[in-house]
């Protein structure tokens, strides 16, 4: 995306998620649905879901479980980029224990309020949510052991800034764990349409772009794990959820049917070009 459109893209994303999180789950046509549905698909274990506040689960929009493939330990400091309703912040806070800390950063007021309520319901005193952009983190330099992110970096219109911020806030030897969608060769109609930017597809990077971007930021040992191709129905669901989330936030002068046809047509063009992946990297120790 042209970075001149960054403020517009960021506003689209924030409005869409503010609207979605404000609608009860039972009333959303593409939202969380029954408690735990999306969370289970994203890789959270049943016992993790059962121990979480309900609002964290039904408002989870992630595409993976970044904490599942790291070695977060008691006493660590974990930073979650785009923390949403707080599901990963709560899980991280429980992993690091009372001597550690979990910090979430989000730009959307409604999500921040939801996450703070979730943290309070969970009774956690070692977790907090800060308002800010993931391109300009309100976090001290070299202050965190782990950066995690769950299907959020693809929402950023300025990913090179995100990677630079990850490198800045990590302590020497610290690691980043990212669950995200990656894509290769998407049609221009998807890449240039903000209706498809508010969730997973339009802003997705390729595997090479991830490797190069993290390396340019100074991170090493970049690895991409469990790269699973999304089926045509899964791609259709992603594009449709993008389109409907955008419409709920801003009709943009289009009839719902018009946008829906576009989503359906474009899904076939995206099939075989979209994958779910787990990405990790490390900041050098010196």
Image (tube, rainbow, N blue to C red):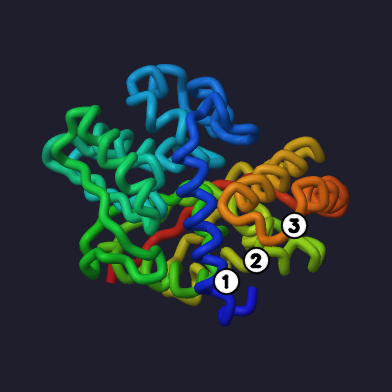
Q: Which mark is residue 254?
A: 3
Relative to 126, 165 lies left or right: right
Name the image quarter holding the C terminus: bottom left
Q: Are marks 2 and 1 in contact (CB under 8 Å)?
A: yes
Q: Position of residue 145 (x, y in %)?
A: 27, 54
Which quadrant would the N terminus be assigned to in this image?
Answer: bottom right
The residue at which mark 2 appears reads as 208
The numbered mark at residue 242 is: none
Q: Distance from label 2 to label 3 (Cα)?
A: 35 Å
Q: Is residue 213 above or below residue 226?
A: below
**Closer to us: mark 3 or mark 1?**
3
**To which quarter of the image does residue 208 belong?**
bottom right
- From the viewer's perspective, tell me whether residue 197 is left or right of residue 137: right
- Residue drawn at the location 62% of the way across and 68% of the way down: 209
Name the N-terminal-most of marks 3 and 1. 1
Mark 1 surroundings: few (<14), some (14-19) or many (≥20) residues within 10 A = some
Assign a secondary structure to mark 2: helix
Q: Position of residue 8 (x, y in %)?
A: 55, 71
Whole-angstrom CA distance, mark 2 to mark 1, is: 6 Å
Distance from the alpha carbon under mark 3 to that under mark 1:
37 Å
Q: In this orientation, does residue 279 appear?
A: no
């Amino acid at each position: 995306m042209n970075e001149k459109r960054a403020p517009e893209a960021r506003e689209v994303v924030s409005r869409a998620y503010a609207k979605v999180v404000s609608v009860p789950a039972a009333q959303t046509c593409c939202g969380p649905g029954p408690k735990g549905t999306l969370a289970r698909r994203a890789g959270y274990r049943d016992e993790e879901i059962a121990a979480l506040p309900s609002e964290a689960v039904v408002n989870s929009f992630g595409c993976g479980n970044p904490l599942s493939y790291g070695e977060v330990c008691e006493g660590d400091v974990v930073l979650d980029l785009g923390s949403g309703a707080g599901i990963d912040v709560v899980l991280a806070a429980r992993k690091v224990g009372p001597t550690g800390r979990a910090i979430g950063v989000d730009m959307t007021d409604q999500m921040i309020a939801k996450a703070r309520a979730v943290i309070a319901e969970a009774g956690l005193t070692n977790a907090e949510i800060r308002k800010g952009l993931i391109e300009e983190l309100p976090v001290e330099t070299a202050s965190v052991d782990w950066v995690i992110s769950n299907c959020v970096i693809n929402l950023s219109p300025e990913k090179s800034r995100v990677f630079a911020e990850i490198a800045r806030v990590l302590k020497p030897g610290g690691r980043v764990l990212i669950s995200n969608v990656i894509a290769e060769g998407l049609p221009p109609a998807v890449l240039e349409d903000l209706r498809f930017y508010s969730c997973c597809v339009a802003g997705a990077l390729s595997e090479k772009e991830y490797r190069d971007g993290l390396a340019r930021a100074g991170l090493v040992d970049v690895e991409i794990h469990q790269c699973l191709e999304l089926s045509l129905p899964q791609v259709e669901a992603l594009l449709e959820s993008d389109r409907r989330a955008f419409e709920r936030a801003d009709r943009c002068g289009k009839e719902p049917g018009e946008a829906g046809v576009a989503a359906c047509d474009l899904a076939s063009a995206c099939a075989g070009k979209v994958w779910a992946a787990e990405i990790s990297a490390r900041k050098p120790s010196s």
